[in-house]
Amino acid sequence: MSNAQVPENPNGLIPPDSLMMRLCSMAPKIWNAYINHEFVQGIADGSLPERAFRHYLMQDYLFLIHFARAYGLAVYKADTLTDMRAAATSVSGILEIEMDLHVRYCKDWGLTEAEMAAVPEDPACMAYTRFVLERGMAGDLLDLHVALSPCVVGYGVIGKSLASNAGGRQDGNPYLPWIEMYAGDEYQDIVKAAVTRLDEMGARRGGAVRFDDLARTFESATRLEVGFWQMGLNAARD
């Protein structure tokens, strides 16, 4: 592979022998486009239009609701108590902790929960969240977690990369709290656990035999994540 075809893995967050890295390696172009998107670069240097970020935040509120539904589906799809408990913990974490943190963070941007709950769902948000749910309903627990992985793992990779990027703007950057949230130890532990869980599920659920199908799911999900970033930019340009 040429350098242009190697999936970027800032700070080596994704283990090179993991299923997650194998999936990234099958779609390096779209993976790199996702973690280096213009929206992300605007967060890094503080140049992202505030209108773009506010639109993203409102849609991310709806996104989190659908991800809670996805992990609820994971409870149903699980066939071990361990997997059921892990999925139930994720549902509880999103509904009881992450949603509250998101609402409080958005308050600093002049957004109320009532306003976010009433906003029309953007087609880009609908496309990715419904794709995740469809893969979970049509497939099994491994299909579902592969579809979730670009978001769960990708945000950790992006946060860590931006936090350690000397070229990024730190002082006075209005997006620094967002960067710190995803670069912080709490979220980084979530990423590491997700990568490990994906390996365990792959081993138990024939990941090697099904790899080509899983890779297609991963590439499609990552492409939809790119669309989610682009959604914010498009809102600022309308």
Image (cartoon, rainbow, N blue to C red):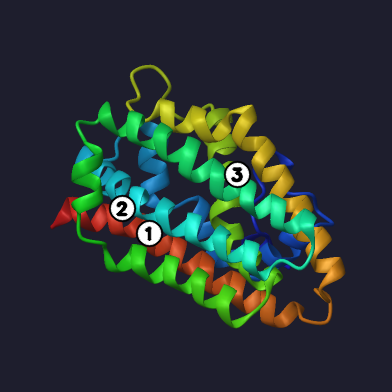
Q: For the residues marked 3 and 1, what is the alpha-carbon distance in whole angstroms?
A: 17 Å
Task: Tell me the tag on residue 5.
Answer: none
Secondary element at image label 1: helix
Q: Amino acid at mark 3?
A: Val
In the picture, which quadrant includes the C terminus? bottom left
Residue 155 place in picture, x, y as percent: 54, 46
Q: Which residue is mark 1?
A: 228
Please report contact status of discs 3 and 1: CB closer than 8 Å, yes or no. no
Q: Quadrant of residue 25?
A: bottom right
Is 54 located above or below residue 238 in the figure? above
Q: For the residues marked 3 and 2, what is the alpha-carbon distance in whole angstroms?
A: 21 Å
Secondary element at image label 2: helix
Q: Residue furthest top?
A: 171
Residue 44 place in picture, x, y as percent: 42, 35
Q: Quadrant of residue 11?
A: top right
Q: Amino acid at mark 1?
A: Phe
Q: Which residue is mark 2?
A: 59
Q: Amino acid at mark 2?
A: Gln
Circle 3 packing at 10 Å, graded few (<14), some (14-19), many (20+), is: many
Q: Which one is earlier in the sequence, the residue at label 2 or at label 1? A: 2
Q: Which residue is mark 3?
A: 157
In the picture, which quadrant includes the N terminus? bottom right
Secondary element at image label 3: helix
In front: mark 2 or mark 1?
A: 2
- State whether residue 47 appears in this view: yes
Horizontal side of 24 relative to 53 (left or right) equals right
Circle 1 packing at 10 Å, graded few (<14), some (14-19), many (20+), is: many
In front: mark 3 or mark 2?
A: 2
Figure disc tally: 3
Q: Give the residue at x 31% y 52%.
A: 59
Q: Give the residue at x 83% y 76%.
A: 206
Q: Which one is earlier in the sequence, the residue at label 3 or at label 1? A: 3
